[in-house]
Image: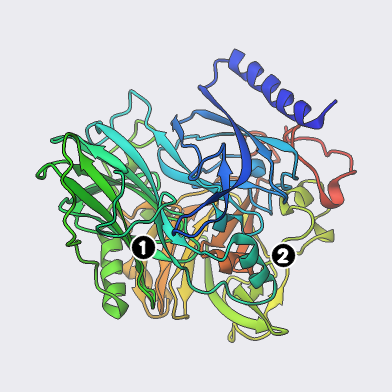
Amino acid sequence: MDTRKFSFFAVLLSILITLAKAEDPYHFFEWKITYGTMSPLGVPQQVILINGIFPGPVINCTSNNNIVVNVFNQLDEPFLLTWNGVQHRKNSWVDGTPGTMCPIQPGTNFTYKFQVKDQIGSYYYFPTTALHKAAGGIGIIQVHSRPLIPVPFDNPADEFAVFVGDWFNKGHKAMKNLLDGGNSIGRPDGIHINGKSAQVGAPAEPSWTFEAGKTYRFRFCNAGMRTSVNFRFQGHDMKLVEVEGSHLMQNEYLSMDLHVGQCMSVLVTADQTPKDYYLVVSSRFTKQPHTTVATIRYAGTNIPATQELPPPPPIKTAGIAWSINQFRSFRWNLTASAARPNPQGSYHYGKINITRTIKLVNSRSYIDGKLRFALNGVSHIDPKTPLKLSEYYGVAEKEFKYDIISDEPPADIEKNVKIAPNVLNATYRNFVEIIFENRENTIQTYHLDGYSFFAVAIEPGKWSPEKRKNYNLEDAVSRHNVAVFPGCWAAVMLTLDNAGMWSLRSEMWERFYLGQQLYVSVLSPERSLRDEFSLPETTQLCGIVTSLPKPPGYV
């Protein structure tokens, strides 16, 4: 029997059984991954399409819904998708990173099945294989609150998914060759908005249409390779209401910084003179500034937008201070409900004792003449067998060693860098503090799969235990991404209550590809289905576990 059909029907059978048990609703998708030609910056190049479009299909769902995506890889290379921000409770098997899954081989398919358990908010999916992220294959995930759970703002007239980020004209294969040769991918060629770029005054069809007096929700995600951006609406204020699954105290802003890997929702009210207006997106903290625009049109008008754009925020040192202050203005809405009826503020993270502190310092170095990036002196490489599979099959010692990275950085992080699989062994249900310290002169952003964490502080200088007195222990935002500015540190806190193998990574994809990442192994000592799902029947095998007998499942 065709293994692709078996995989799909096995998933379908399990779904039918669970539907009989009256589980939460299901959404089914069938995606064909192909190459196509588009011109995000006006230069035709190869991009990755999903069902013929870029950006890819929007996953529009509700908290606790089950998502089933049958992915057909019609590229000439192995392919994987990860679901950035989806926590995959007890289910790192479908997280879509090289440390958890075997890639989908060309000409084959794989069916992802996961649940957006106890989550709401704005997330996105993207490829983790090769340098496919530089070519597209991205799409927004919109998770709405359940009907009976109140949302702290009125339903908008409509909502719009907006990808912003940098773009390179080199092409993803050329960029991969640069990195494989030990070189940098260099600087981007421009900024795109949903795969397009436009200049002020150039003829362009409207991207969105407003009706006067109505309010609209824009969900922004920065899925770029390395560049922070700032976005602003010509003539309109915006109200920030959600960041990566958390409702916020609602402040109004003229412009917003959005760092790589981050998502947020803003409300914009059509309260200006009816005509065209620009959404403006510009690069941040780059030597060569880039700006692009997209057009918003009030219904029933055809008056062009004025060419005077809202100004960008400050740059250089003043710009860093400006962006840190904006981060500090984000406050968790303690009385609002999120995915559950109870208020977000009912979880008092600031009163939990820290059981472990992990301080991570990033570094850039050359090893045998080739560029590498590292955390605490360890530069990660992926073994032939996904880490999670090696661990589950009991052969981890043949593929990697735990804890070659220490909880404290070495005295000289740029010397004696180790290139090896980087796996940190963590204790289930521990409450941990992670410090990201950036001693380089470029901004960093970090993401942790499987969790959200409380981003309690960002400050200049070096971290020390005395800095804890400056933490926000009341209403820091629960999120999955944090920016670390040059010469600064950031602190996050979380409970390791989601068993699995989870990627903690730089979202600067050049750095990710060349080693600035690690995996956190969180194992429940009871090996219980209460804490983690067993290996799914449809899991693809590769590496040294291909022909091994399947271990007994959790009980």
Q: Which mark is residue 421?
A: 2
The answer to whether 227 is drawn above or below residue 384 in the figure is below
The answer to whether 258 is drawn above or below residue 487 in the figure is above
Seen from the viewer's position, the closer of residues 96 and 401 is 96
Residue 405 visible in the displayed image: no
The answer to whether 297 is drawn above or below residue 465 in the figure is above
Report how many numbered discs are placed on residues in the image: 2
Q: Residue furthest front?
A: 203
Which of the marked residues, 2 or 1, is nearer the chain's N terminus?
Answer: 1
Seen from the viewer's position, the closer of residues 450 and 173 is 173
- Using residue 155 as the reference point, say whether residue 489 is left or right of it: right
Q: Badge 1 is on which residue? A: 229
Classify residue 442 by image quadrant. Answer: bottom left
The quadrant of the picture occupied by the N terminus is top right
Give the residue type at disc 2. Answer: Pro
Q: Secondary structure at mark 1?
A: strand
Give the residue type at disc 1. Answer: Val
Residue 422 location (% of width, % of height): 68, 65
- Using residue 370 as the reference point, say whether residue 65 is left or right of it: left
Q: Residue furthest left?
A: 273
Q: Which mark is residue 191?
A: none
Residue 182 location (% of width, % of height): 67, 77
Q: Dot 1: few (<14), some (14–19), or many (≥20) neighbours within 10 Å? A: many
The quadrant of the picture occupied by the C terminus is top right
Q: Which residue is depicted at the point 69% across and 85% down?
A: 369
The answer to whether 283 is drawn above or below residue 94 in the figure is below
Q: Which residue is depicted at the point 31% across and 73% down?
A: 320
Classify residue 527 by image quadrant. Answer: top right
